[in-house]
Amino acid sequence: MRARYRRTTALAAVLLSTALGAAACAGGSSGRAASPRPSAASAEPSPSASPSNDPAAVKANELGVVPVLMYHQFVAQPKGVYDQTPAQLKAELTRLYRQGYRTITAAAFVSGTIDVPAGKSPMVLTFDDATVSQYGELPDGSVDPTSGLGILLAVGKANGEEHPVATFYVNEEPFAGRDSYLKKLHDLGMEIGDHTLTHANLKRLNDTQVQAEIAKDLTFIRRSVPGIDVTTFALPLGIHPVNKGLAAKGRFGTTSYSFAGVMLVGAGPAPSPYSLRFKPLAVPRLLSGHDKSEYFAATYWLNRIGTTRYISDGDPDRISFPKAAADKLSPRFASQARPY
Ligand SMILES: [Zn+2]
């Protein structure tokens, strides 16, 4: 059962308790295959109850494409092709919000639990490698507003999204050895995903080594965030192991893993999880970087998504789309379909 879109005040409580050094787990055990959005028992009425929530009125197209963006570092002087300045991140996020995008986690995306208001479009923001510029804290334990997450939270709030979410694909010694940050991120409603223990090039490893890399990272994450459900994996360097299936499912020692989603590096927007084209174990990502001419592929694609993008009907239990797009629907979702 999928939760309807709701605004809550639970995150404020989590933020406060985090700042006090007594963070409570906001994840809960809802059975959803995601790091769920923090939620409260007393939610406001769902927008889907509004008479204006007519799929045609908002041009809903839940078979449209979704941008999954990949970020690495935010530094004043970018070096790597995937680095950005903090100002570039702010500008890119501002553009996305103003165009009607709202955040969901990778876990929510691959499991088809897309919960954004009517007329808005989902976007998945993924941060790879747990670099120090992605998340930092002030001395009182609050989010450093100059870090990547600090920028996202501010831009989201300024554009009407009270609780933005993102997915962090982490290796050992995240955020320069600040393992405790993983639980903080989880408590803030962020998803933590597997990215192998040592950021290995999986193609160079044998089957046992591949599974060890993935399972040991999973063990590390679980030790850092007790009770966490890790459901997505990002391939380091976007490179598959020789035995491709081991990226999604395997076992090392007593640790087994079975991911609902595997993220690639590049290229192009991802198909809707309700469409026939969707491949959860090969989710393409847009590459954000500082060089707009050559490597700023996110901008290239965002300029071209246009009318092909996913637009929500505001009701997470129904899948709305124009009748003309009906042949794109995966039969798995036929019972929820609402063509118009
Ligand atoms: Zn990486």
Image: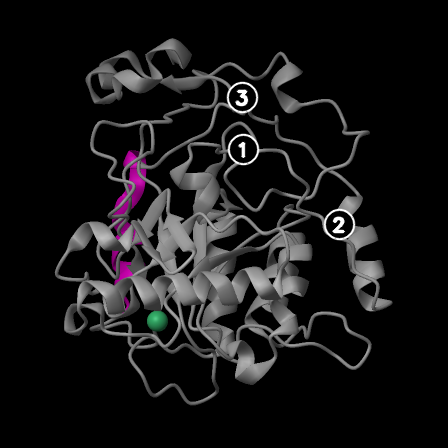
* Foreground pick, 191 / 52: 191
Distance between mark 2 and mark 1 Cα atoms: 17 Å
Tell me residue 88's x, y (percent). Answer: 45, 72
Check if mark 1's residue and mark 3's residue have beta carbons within 8 Å. Answer: no
Q: Which residues are magenta?
A: 296-308
Against 217, residue 60 (above or below) is above
Sequence-wise first label, 2 or 1: 2
Query: Which quadrant of the rendered structure holds the C terminus?
Result: top left
Sequence-wise first label, 2 or 3: 2
Q: Please say whether residue 340 is visible from this viewpoint.
A: no
- Is residue 231 magenta-colored? no
Residue sitting at the far left: 242
Some atom of ligand 1 lies within 8 Å of the CB belonging to the residue at label 1: no
Badge 1: few (under 14), some or many (20 or more) residues near its Cα, within 10 Å? many
- Residue type (three-letter) at the residue carrying disc 1: Asp
Tell me residue 317's x, y (percent). Answer: 51, 19
* Foreground pick, 5 / 311: 5
Residue 11 has which mark? 2
Against 53, residue 174 (above or below) is below
Sequence-wise first label, 1 or 3: 1
Q: Circle 1 is placed at which residue position?
A: 115
- Residue type (three-letter) at the residue carrying disc 3: Asp
Some atom of ligand 1 lies within 8 Å of the CB belonging to the residue at label 2: no
- Side of 230 where 307 appears, left or right: left
Badge 3: few (under 14), some or many (20 or more) residues near its Cα, within 10 Å? many
Q: Circle 3 is placed at which residue position?
A: 315
Against 80, residue 9 (above or below) is above
Query: Which quadrant of the rendered structure holds the N terminus?
Result: top right
* Foreground pick, 69 / 141: 141
- Main secondary structure type of the part rendered in magenta: helix
Tell me residue 222's x, y (percent). Answer: 56, 59
